Image (cartoon, rainbow, N blue to C red):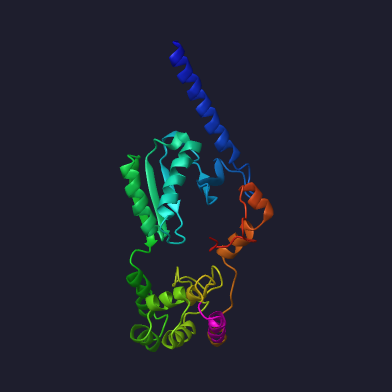
Amino acid sequence: MKSGQCMAFVTFLLACFMAESLSKADKIVALPGQPKVNFQHFSGYITVDEKKQRALFYYLVEAETILASKPLVLWLNGGELKFDKTRDNLVFQERWFVKFPQYKNRDFFVAGESYAGHYVPQLAQLSVQLKQNLKRIAIGNPLLEFVTDMNSADQYYWSHDLISDSAYELLISFCNSSRLMREAIRRSFSSDCLSVYIEVATELTKSIDRYDVIADVYLSFGQSPMSTFSHPLLSGPQHLSSLHSQADGLSQHQVGVKVHPGIQDETTKYLNRKDVQKSLHAQLVGITSSNLCNK
């Protein structure tokens, strides 16, 4: 073997060793309470902006069988709609492949929901430009066009008899969901929207799961569909959350609904356990606990 070939071979071995070391550090030995599994899983952080000290968390679950021939699927959970989000996702993707080079030439699929309705197509376009092995994209329940997506819920609830004709008339005549959301984002509510909010919130109660309105009464977060607008990140006047609570409490008293803890409550509780966070190599930076809407 010539010296140049020898040097290239040594460099290749060194690169493989470094990549294996990087991924090994993120390997999950076991999750608390988890039964024995026949697959490997990894989790950790990929830095996407050193100057701003920003990193994205990932969780990788490998296939149980015939691992070498399985495709790679990237799932994006939506989150906030920001200008630099697609850029972050691309940097994450490139640096993640450095840590897991064995996946770089696999068939690649990108999927997601909510705001990923924007991120996925944008990331796919960049992936194609970079000649990556992208095969397909998939988006479910995506946010594509604000007014259409927000207001479609009004008709959906009405057509499923979840709100009355009078409540629906208020939505379409005075303040629909897209206007209500915009006012919530601006933290400035008109009297029309506050009145409509209170009326509709008394009907869209904790007894309705907006993700499965025909299912048995079993709540994910003990929230009604209208609680979207009273989330701390979107709340306008300080009294909006209390208005929602009063309206929701009144309607529950009327129908006698008993609230049960749901799977998302249990998941949140589990992910806030210190032993679980240690197993996942998760770090809480700037927050005291993890929840569905942490930035």
Quadrant position of the N terminus in the picture: top left
Q: Is residue 221 magenta?
A: no
Q: Main secondary structure of the magenta part?
A: helix
Q: Residue at x 42, y 39 (%)?
A: 70
Tell me if residue 19 comes above or below residue 281 in the rendering: above
The magenta segment is 236-250
Instruction: Give the total number of marks visible in the rendering.
Output: 0
Q: Residue at x 48, y 85 (%)?
A: 198
Instruction: Name the residue furthest top.
Output: 1
Q: Is residue 249 magenta?
A: yes
Question: Can residue 24 be seen here?
Answer: yes
Question: Can residue 66 be seen here?
Answer: no
Give the percent coordinates (x, y) of residue 117. Answer: 37, 59
Quarter-wise, where is residue 156 in the image?
Answer: bottom left
Give the percent coordinates (x, y) of residue 256. Answer: 57, 83
Q: Is residue 6 left or right of residue 160?
A: right
Tell me if residue 31 comes above or below residue 205 in the rendering: above
Q: Is residue 157 left or right of residue 239?
A: left
Q: Is residue 69 left or right of residue 263?
A: left
Q: Residue at x 44, y 10 (%)?
A: 2
Tell me if residue 288 comes above or below residue 14 in the rendering: below
